[in-house]
Amino acid sequence: MLAALTEQDLSLTMLAQDKIGELFSQVDDAIQGVRVFANPGGCSGISFGMTFTDSVNDNDGVLAVGGFKLIVDEGTLQYLRGVEIDFVDRGDGNASFVFNNLPSMGGGCGTCGSAGSCS
């Protein structure tokens, strides 16, 4: 297992901590934490997401936050060092987690021919 993660590796705003804590309180006891993952795709080449997980693997780093664990595998962590996860509720039923301070990974707006997806 990776060493315990710190807020310098990956951080959550208070809004994100509160929302994840609220969601985590609604799952069964088999859930070990919230896994942050990376998938190929999009203009930047990588998109990120989160899901509940019932396992912690040998190559995972763990950030203990409030009443839950944030779990990130070694491969994903290389893209997320210094990133802040926030929860944004626009008040119109459109709420989501956002990843702030993502490092530039090449590509970007205008390079894939899909300018509409960059706004």
Image (spheres, helix red, strand yellow):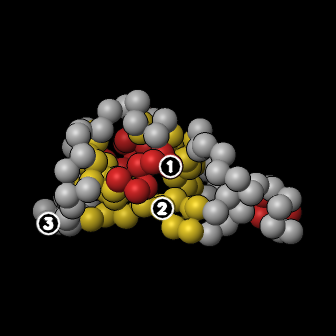
Amino acid found under the numbered disc labelled 2: Ala
Q: Which mark is residue 38?
A: 2
Circle 2 packing at 10 Å, graded few (<14), some (14-19), many (20+), is some
User: Disc number at residue 30?
Assistant: 3
Quadrant placement of the C terminus: bottom right
Which of the two labelled residues, at mark 1 and mark 3, occupies the earlier sequence position?
3
Q: Position of residue 110 (x, y in %)?
A: 86, 59
User: What residue sits 37% from the left and 64% below the top?
Assistant: 51
User: Between 13 and 42, which is closer to the camera in this rendering?
Assistant: 42
- Decide if residue 13 is on the left or right side of residue 29: right
* Label 1: few (<14), some (14–19) or many (≥20) C-alpha neighbours in 10 Å: some
- Tag 3 near tag 2, CB within 8 Å: no
Regarding residue 12, the answer to whether it shows in the image is no
Query: SS at mark 2?
Result: strand
Q: Are marks 1 and 2 in contact (CB under 8 Å)?
A: yes
Q: Is residue 31 above or below residue 77?
A: below
Residue located at (59% from left, 38% from top): 101
Q: Residue at x 46, y 40 (%)?
A: 81
Query: Badge 1 is on which residue?
Result: 79
Q: CA distance from mark 3 to mark 2?
A: 23 Å
> SS at mark 1?
helix
Residue 75 placed where, x, y %? 40, 56
Q: Nearer the viewer, mark 1 or mark 3?
A: 1
Which of marks 2 and 1 precedes in the sequence? 2
